[in-house]
Image: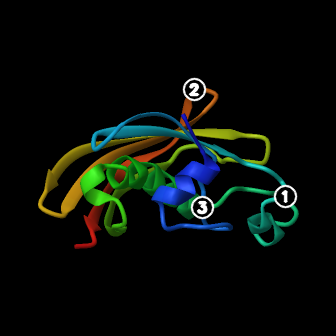
Amino acid sequence: MYNSNEISKILPHKFPFLLIDRIIEMEEGKYAKGIKNITVTDPVFQGHFPDEHVYPGVLIVEAMAQVGAFAILSEEKNIGKKAYFTKIKEVKFLKTVVPGDTLEITTTLISRRLNVGFANCIACVNGEVVCRGEIAFALSL
């Protein structure tokens, strides 16, 4: 549906911190589903960990937030705004993610009030949940 070039027109993130390769499904302002391909050439693996590559959990959480931010920031009224983390709640890491894996991330907005919102996030590899949690965000005014 959206490739990385199109995503970078909506999100303020750029390489190497744009963590979404594609948005494959979306309903503006409600939810989005995105893909992150984990490759051994990612610079993060130079230090995490050189002898046993494990994709950092904090980057999985950031990728989940970026998928949600895309769903929000693609709305006409939010174009040009930024979404900021305000809370990360009950995030659980259930399996390690390694090079060769493809993260399929679904972020669903559960409530919004003024410029603050909450979303449920799930990241899967091959249909198995590897991370889940809830995030809160605030939109720039």
CA separation in Å, label 2 and label 3: 23 Å
Furthest-top residue in this view: 127
The colour mode here is rainbow
Q: Nearer the viewer, residue 34 or 120?
A: 34
How many residues crowd mark 3 within 10 Å: few (<14), some (14–19), many (20+)?
some
Q: Earlier in the sequence, mark 2 or mark 3?
A: 3
For this view, does 138 lie left or right of residue 79?
left
Q: Which residue is mark 2?
A: 127
Give whichever of discs 2 and 1 has the lower sequence position.
1
Give the residue at x 22% y 56%: 117
Where's residue 96, x and y in %?
Answer: 65, 48
User: Foreground: 29 or 121?
Assistant: 29
Locate the N terminus and report the quarter of the image it occupies.
top right
* Callout 2: SS: loop
Q: Measuring from the top left, give residue 56's x and y in whole percent.
A: 63, 61
Q: Nearer the viewer, mark 2 or mark 3?
A: 3
- Front residue of this view, candidates 10 and 128: 10
Name the residue carrying label 1.
41
How many C-alpha atoms fall within 10 Å of the one at disc 1: few (<14), some, or many (≥20)? Answer: few
Task: Return the disc, 1 or 3, that comes first in the chain's sequence.
Answer: 3
